[in-house]
Image: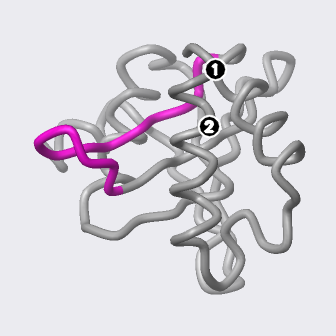
């Protein structure tokens, strides 16, 4: 991702953030979160017709084979589904964990889950 794309993405996040997604993160903290998720290949940008409609960041723990989904921001449905599909294809042996509405959600068999949501 080049600098122009990163600036556009961070501006979109700052404009659209609400609740806990990237909550009160300054510009440089958002950039660091995105760069880390990209490095670990657990980052998805969703867009329709060239317009961003969501981002999802994750963190990968290779020792425990777990991907933690965090900082999901959407303006349209489908971003979490895209993130889960990306992760289950890329890391079929990893468990996916996420926090939703203050409850821990665990997907023990991500490969099976991906088949159900296609």
**Of residues 24 and 56, the one drawn nearer to the viewer in this rendering:** 24
Q: Is 13 on the left or on the right of 81, as rendered?
A: right
Q: Is residue 39 above or below residue 84?
A: above
Give the labeled residue for mark 1. Answer: 3
What numbered label is drawn on residue 7?
2
Q: Is 59 on the left or on the right of 91, as rendered?
A: right
Farthest front residue? 4
Q: Quadrant of residue 82?
A: top left
Decide whether the magenta segment is chiefly helix, strand or loop: strand
Q: Where residue 110 appears, x then y in whole percent?
A: 42, 37
Query: Residue visible at 73% across and 63% down?
Result: 22
Residue segment shown in magenta: 41-53
Query: Residue visible at 78% across and 26% down?
Result: 36
Q: Is 116 on the left or on the right of 47, as rendered?
A: left
Q: Where residue 98 appears, x then y in whole percent?
A: 63, 58
Query: Residue visible at 55% across and 32% down?
Result: 43
* Quadrant (top left/top right/bottom left/bottom right) for the N terminus: top right
Q: Are marks 2 and 1 in contact (CB under 8 Å)?
A: yes
How many residues crowd mark 1 within 10 Å: few (<14), some (14–19), many (20+)? Answer: few
Q: Where residue 75 appears, x then y in whole percent?
A: 34, 70
Taking the magenta stretch, the answer to whether it contains residue 49 is: yes
Taking the magenta stretch, the answer to whether it contains residue 37 is: no
Query: Residue visible at 41% across and 65% down?
Result: 74
Q: Quadrant of residue 25?
A: bottom right
């Amino acid at each position: 991702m080049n600098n122009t794309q990163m600036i556009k993405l961070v501006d979109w996040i700052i404009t659209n953030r609400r609740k806990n997604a990237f909550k009160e993160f300054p510009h440089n903290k958002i950039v660091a979160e995105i760069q880390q998720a990209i490095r670990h290949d657990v980052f998805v940008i969703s867009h329709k017709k060239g317009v961003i409609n969501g981002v999802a960041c994750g963190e990968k723990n290779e020792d425990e084979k777990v991907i933690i989904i965090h900082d999901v921001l959407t303006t349209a449905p489908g971003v979490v589904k895209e993130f889960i599909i990306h992760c289950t294809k890329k890391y079929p042996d990893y468990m996916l964990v996420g926090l939703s509405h203050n409850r821990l959600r665990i997907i023990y068999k991500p490969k099976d889950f991906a088949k159900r949501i296609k």
